[in-house]
Amino acid sequence: MAASEAPARTSASVGDPAVPTGPGPGRGSGGTTRISARLGLRARVTAAFGVGAFALSAMMAGITYFAARQSFLSERQTAVQRQAFVNASLVQNSLRSPGIAVNQLLESVDTLPGSRSVLHYQGQWYATSVSVGQSAIPAPERNLVLAGTPASQLFSAGGSSQVVVGVPLPAVHAAYFEVFSLDELANTLRTLEYALAAAALVTTVAGIAVGRWASGRALRPLGGITEAAVAIAGGDLDTRVEAGDDTDLQELAEAFNRMAANLQARIEREARFTSDVSHELRSPLTTLSASVGVLEAHRSELDPRAQRALALLDGDLHRFKRMVDDLLEISRFDAGSAELSLDVVDPVELVRRAVLATAPIGEDGRRVPSAFPVEVGPGVPGLRLEVDKRRFERVMANLVDNAAAYAGGVTRVVIDREPPAGEGDGPATAVRVAVEDGGSGVPVAERVRVFDRFYRGDRSGQPATGDGTGLGLSLVAEHVRLHGGSVRIEDAPSGGARFVVELPLSPTGRRAAP
Amino acid sequence: MSRILVVEDDERIRQSMRLALEDEGYAVDDVASGEEAVARFAREPAELVLIDLMLPGIDGFETCRSLRRHSTVPVIMVTARSDTHDVVAGLEAGADDYVTKPFVAKELAARIRALLRRSRPDADGPSVLTFGDVELEPDAGVVRRSGAEVHCTRTEFRLLCELAGNPGKVLSREQLLERVWGYDYFGDGRLVDVHVRRLRTKVEPDPANPQFILTVRGMGYKLAV
């Protein structure tokens, strides 16, 4: 039962740097530490990886985009300029020849695709396209060039990027302009944008995937530690974790193992103490028991008051012995040293014998047969049950004692098989022994707690007769659990409580007798 | 009046045991150590010996083995620990039975009576039982193997008589506990197991691979026919 308290404490303090790792009982005991807020560790690592990958890829995409754009633009501008200068010198030469048709001249100029020429000659504007005239050239550049300075400028008109290159031709009193549309470049850049965005997306997804994988991998050892903690909480105190050759994990693993070892040592120390105490008590108890036995033999020589005192002494000596035995038994369970000594028996015979053993011994030295019936369900005779007889005898004795102390005694005992016979549920796997009493039942809220050590609930308001040790039912639970079985409380048809012990036909994974 | 030797180092327990056993009608000798017990037994043999396992000097096991070297006297071990291997070790040292502290005087008396009881397993049965090269005479309490006498304790002898008297029949540990030791259904099966082991070393040609006293898994023991 001590194990049931453990999980609440162990679950809290794993993996927090504030938890002291050194030995020393009491340090940090009772305190619980919060591991994280809302998101799990794994989700947070994954998110961090995702955000990191996104930021990095977005930045790289941005840099790439702007560098590419810059490079494309300057390359295009240079090409346009070179072309414009070549064309300007061509136009200048042509204008020197007399009688030239300016419009035809402009048409004949070989321009790059998407570029248009504009010429200012003798105070007039000429253009290759009706849509492009002097108005297509931004005013500052126009004035600058007309004033005799070559100019080149990127500008935006009508939602599209354009480059204008202006070359003054002072020798012929003219100025030649070329306007070049960058729409094609914009298309190229848009494609680049999409490609970079897609790449950034892929990188981000990959980052998340890597984050998930890496966090899973990093947290895998925590899984091992969790398993170990669960095993320890479940009572397997020998469980330890292996650190492997990971130096980061070694510290955690060592701290964990140290914690487990301390816990184990402490539990063993307590169990040994209980065991030592009950052994030490045995010597004086032996003297007491033998001496009271002598007094009992000379009972008739005592006066009535002394006889009554002797009866009290004898009764409580018996109870004291039971308590020492029970404590010793419990210390064995706590130390994990309780072992089954198995025999294969007939369950009906076993229950009958166990019930008989609880009956008081009469004047003639024989057991007085019990006043309650032992009913045998269908399909039970012929079964073979592998059981520790001594432990089963203690289970029955404790249940019968409990009924006598709190519920007016046992009304009947029923033996059944599990699954019930005749329902086509296959062969029996377990034997069920129900002990019903004549009390008023156990409230649902107390049906688990009555199996706690020294639990004294308000059992139907009946005064205890003082025979119990307070350990009986908890030992019932321990004995049954050692067999891999279970015990529970139900309502008996008669209105009292019904203690149901279920034992597997063969306890698994336990030591068998020769 | 049967004479009982009590070996117990605790003065008060010794005194109370003496009182209780004398009340039951036994003559009691008591000593406080294993060495004294061996010396006393050599001088004045008792009919039964009670040995506490935890003794100063030579312990209860060694005391029991020393007594066994020269005697088949019934020995009851007194132990404070029934759970440990002490019980099996005590039985292997030659004890016939054990009681756990604190014992009830009446129960101890019952165990003593069962061990002192004269062996008459089957009054109408044959006067000689044989299997293999082993021959036993229940009335005379003699076991011979290939004609040579084998020294058995009274308990070993009774156990052998039960098995040999029911050749081929499986006897459960409960039956053997009841018939040989006088225990009820919940007696300690280890008593039977250890005594069977001890018997095998005395009557089997190869105790590790018994031919006569066979274990029937989950059932008990039987004598092969």
Image: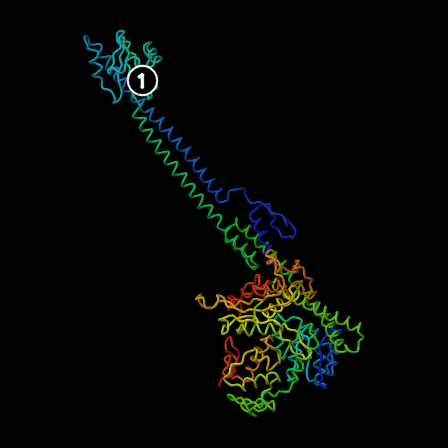
Residue depicted at x 43% and y 38%: A53
The quarter in which the N terminus of chain A is drawn is bottom right
Residue depicted at x 45% and y 68%: A422
The x and y percentages for residue A364 are 68, 80
For the residue carrying disc 1, how many other residues have a C-alpha within 10 Å: few (<14), some (14-19), or many (20+)? Answer: many
Vertical position of residue B200 compared to residue B139: above or below: above
Vertical position of residue A331 compared to residue A34: above or below: below
Residue situated furthest front in the rendering: A494
Vertical position of residue A150 compared to residue B133: above or below: above
What chain is tagged by disc 1? A
**Residue A123 seen anywhere in this rendered image of the structure:** yes
In this rendered view, identify the residue nearer to me: B221 or B90: B221
In this rendered view, identify the residue nearer to me: B203 or A280: A280
The x and y percentages for residue A156 are 34, 19
Residue situated furthest top in the rendering: A123
> How did the renderer colour the structure?
rainbow
- Give residue A178's quadrant in the image: top left
The x and y percentages for residue A373 are 58, 72
Q: Would you name the residue on which mark 1 appears? A: A164
In this rendered view, identify the residue nearer to me: A413 or A170: A413
Could you say whether the residue bearing mark 1 is in a helix, strand or loop?
strand
**Residue B70 seen anywhere in this rendered image of the structure:** no
- Give residue A99's quadrant in the image: top left
The x and y percentages for residue A378 are 49, 71
Residue type highlighted by circle 1: Val
In this rendered view, identify the residue nearer to me: A198 or A79: A198
